[in-house]
Image (cartoon, helix red, strand yellow):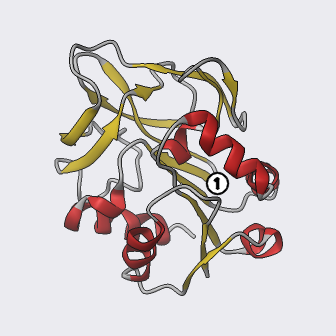
Amino acid sequence: MIAILDYGSGNLRSAHRAFERSGQEVIVTSDFETALNATGLVVPGVGAFAACMKGLQAVRGDEIVRQRVALNRPTLGICVGMQILFARGVEHGAHAGVGIWDATVEKLETKVLPHMGWNTVTPHKESKIFKGVESESFYFVHSYAVTKSVGKIESYTDYEGQFIAAIEDGAMTATQFHPEKSGDAGLHLIKNWVATL
């Protein structure tokens, strides 16, 4: 069973539909034990870093994620759901994140923000989630990202400079883009992640 964590942020309906198409049972939940014990957990995210962290902490989602890491249980963060997994974010001031990776989510240094729309990703040669969609485009909408190398397998996107588009690091996976809004390529990527569960 895949649990999509409901903490007041994210495209829950579109995420639910997309992950259901992987053939798995999918539920949307804010229940601690259900999210902790699910075969796979999805942490979506839309909006500002601090607001997402506040919502996450309200359902003890930060504890859930840390415990899942300790138990080696697969977890996928999406967009701001990826960003809050880092140690810090500087959107509207400095804020602490979950701290899975020691890096700061910083404002992109580019003329046009947000970075919104379709862009390609340069997958790491050992990536599992990009298998079969290495040259496809994915849907992004964000103004902040991480440029510092932190994970075991990192894939990058260029937008007047490189930033991390995806991380695969043991049980933890995260994408800065929205696979649930990325058409067939996104569905393929979701199925690739589900296949690792």
The relative height of residue 195 versus residue 8 in the rendered view (above or below) is below
Residue 56 locus on image (x, y percent): 70, 51
Rendered-image quadrant of the N terminus: bottom right
User: Can you tell which quarter of the image residue 147 is in?
Assistant: top left
Residue 48 locus on image (x, y percent): 52, 37
For the point 71% across and 62% down, the residue is 73
In screen coordinates, is 90 left or right of 126?
right
For the point 41% across and 41% down, the residue is 176
The relative height of residue 197 versus residue 24 in the rendered view (above or below) is above
For the residue pair 179 and 195, the one nearer the viewer reads as: 179
Residue holding disc 1:
171
In screen coordinates, is 69 left or right of 139?
right
Label 1: how many Cα within 10 Å (few below 14, some 14–19, many 20+): some
The relative height of residue 189 versus residue 81 in the rendered view (above or below) is below
In screen coordinates, is 177 left or right of 11?
left
For the residue pair 111 and 156, the one nearer the viewer reads as: 111
Q: Amino acid at mark 1?
A: Ala
Residue 161 locus on image (x, y percent): 28, 16
User: Can you tell which quarter of the image residue 110 is in?
Assistant: top left
In screen coordinates, is 132 left or right of 74?
left
Total numbered badges shown on the rendered structure: 1
Label 1 residue SS: loop
For the point 65% across and 59% down, the residue is 7
Rendered-image quadrant of the C terminus: bottom right
For the residue pair 172 and 14, the one nearer the viewer reads as: 14
The relative height of residue 175 versus residue 73 in the rendered view (above or below) is above
Residue 149 locus on image (x, y percent): 51, 22
For the point 68% across and 50% down, the residue is 55
